[in-house]
Amino acid sequence: MAPPMQHVVEQVTQRIADRSSASRAAYLERIRAAGAVGPARTELPCSNLAHGFAACSGPDRLAVRGAVKPGIAIVSAYNDMLSAHQPYAEYPAWLKDAVREAGGVAQFAGGVPAMCDGITQGRTGMELSLFSRDVIAMATGVALSHEMFDGALLLGVCDKIVPGLLIGALSFGHLPTVLVPAGPMPSGLPNREKSRIRQLFAEGKASREDLLEAESASYHSPGTCTFYGTANSNQLVVEVMGLHLPGSSFVPPGTPLRKALTEEAARRIVELGRGVDRTPIGEIIDERAIVNGVVALLATGGSTNHTLHLVAIAAAAGIELTWDDFSDLSAVVPSLAKVYPNGSADINHFAAAGGVQTLVGELLDAGLLHPDVKTVAGPGLDRYRQQPFLEDGELVWRDAPAKSLDPDVLRGVDEPFAPDGGLRVLDGNLGRSVIKVSAVSAEHRAVTAPARVFDDQHGFTAAFQAGELDHDVVVVIRNQGPQANGMPELHGLTPALGVLMDRGHQVALVTDGRMSGASGKIPAAIQLTPEASAGGPLARVRDGDVVRLDADRGTLEVLVPDDELAARDNAPAAPGAQYGTGRELFAAFRQAVGRADRGASVFAPPTAQPADVTA
């Protein structure tokens, strides 16, 4: 018998369901109407269908023409510039062979763009990054729009890519869909050593060659980067939401087990496409699955980017998720993992300690996860207590260790690293923001200091290098919100801010931009909304204003009388941020994008208005 649900988890789930009842019902009506049409290509006129198999040959041509075998779409974010996506080069051939052997037919339906935030950090290209999520969603929609398919395989790993694939697939929520991961690269230079050299470089105590050597020893081969940023948060969260095969998130690329899991995903989508345990993605992602994803994120100190992405994913399924839901869940979900930047271990160490399967077991037994959910592996989250193995070349699943094999990396609910999930919402006269404190020492969680205001990160860097910030300071970087410039990550600020903290100063960051999944030891109030360029109070903060950030009390405020703050003129938006490096192509996105606390999406929020469904 499953243990009773933790009461706050149950309450938050219920209020999400109540809040979303009309929009969720309308969404389910739409996808169920689409699903009732049956195998789509049987309804296509002959000319349309002929176009659909014109490029096929051999048995695949006969299968598509016959319109009997399940048709499976492959949508891939492959490119060979991203280490995490380079392994996908071989996947389409593997998947097509496995689908064919299982009695279906797979077609490569479309590719989606995949940019690397690691390459674009601190560069103007980063201003396209968040918007790429919605481009990926639209590209996924284009790939699935041909009405040829009975199921889909989505290939993607990193940052905006997995959320974009999911948002796009949810517009085709009547289709069974399996996400197919690629796995992490082997462990390289320890992350703490990499951070130490970054700080030395920021101080001028290490050369560019020293820094490049350290970075290339950290990011050194195909596979996902091994720190616990957004890419690995994606993998863990979607597995706990039931969208991966159990245990598949952190199996390394280039291994027999990785290939076996990829082929098994192909076999499974054929079963789902035939109607065996048919579970469309729009039915899997319900209120319980969303809460499970949030709980897993919080229990492991995952990426703050998911306070945007999970909100947007939920909205695509007709569900309204709010930052208050994150905050209330964080208060009762204990911190069970220490993976960099929250600790010294990397994602491979986490997997070796028991990984997702041991984590799921701990959270289920504590009533912190909903067990009665639908998954791509079948009904019930208990299946995700099992991990995959190869026995005589055959893929099997066995129960994972019930307890962590390394309590320095992964712990149980009865001995957590901290009693809460470390994600807080800050409110005050500057607006609303989020902060992740799982890597912030207790003595640094409350900072009161004069503000130094910048309109971009380059101004901050220049001031740091000039020695102007060697004192207690709250660094304010504004005009970095979604309407201003696409809400770039500001992770490149971390080394210099770390230097100031290590010199004994009180230091904090306040910004309407993002700080990425690598948020670390600096208390950072991020994603502040309303943003400065939309007239938010941050536009009226001046150098020298005293700012108080208190993560324990959940407050963020500038110590200026409200009437004085309101009477000030807004600072002008930083000039010259709209053109070059493709930024002019996204002007319409900047005009249409919503607030950070609504997912910073260009798509409309959930609505109760059902849409027409046509065959």
Image (cartoon, helix red, strand yellow):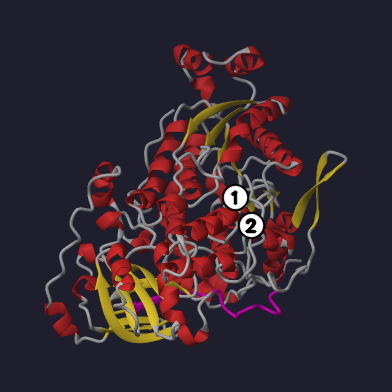
- For the residue marked with disc 1, what is the amino acid? His
Q: Nearer the viewer, residue 319 or 206?
A: 206
Q: Nearer the viewer, residue 322 or 232?
A: 232
Instruction: Say which quarter of the image contains residue 571.
Output: bottom left
Circle 2 is placed at which residue position?
188
Res 220 label:
1
Q: Nearer the viewer, residue 398 or 518?
A: 518
Res 26 label:
none
Q: Check if mark 1's residue and mark 2's residue have beta carbons within 8 Å.
A: yes
Q: At 50% across and 13% down in the image, what residue appears?
A: 50
Q: At 61% across and 74% down in the image, what residue appears?
A: 335
The C terminus, quarter of image:
top left
The spot of residue 23 in percent (x, y) is 41, 53
Residue 131 is a magenta residue: no
Q: Residue furthest right?
A: 392
Label 2, residues with CA under 10 Å away: few <14, some 14-19, many ≥20: some
**Horizontal side of residue 222 vs 48, given as left or right:** right
Query: Does the rendering let one see residue 24?
Result: no
Q: How many marks?
A: 2
Question: In this rendering, is residue 591 above or below 347?
Answer: above
Magenta stretch: give its range. Answer: 412-427
In primary-sequence order, the first of circles 1 and 2 is 2
- For the residue marked with disc 2, what is the amino acid? Gly
Query: Does the rendering let one see residue 309?
Result: yes
Question: In this rendering, is residue 529 above or below 390?
Answer: below
The spot of residue 533 in percent (x, y) is 22, 62
Helix, strand or loop status at disc 1? loop
Instruction: Say which quarter of the image contains residue 353.
Output: bottom right
Q: At 24% across and 46% down in the image, what residue appears?
A: 587
**Horizontal side of residue 488 vs 65, given as left or right:** left
**Horizontal side of residue 302 vs 498, given as left or right:** right
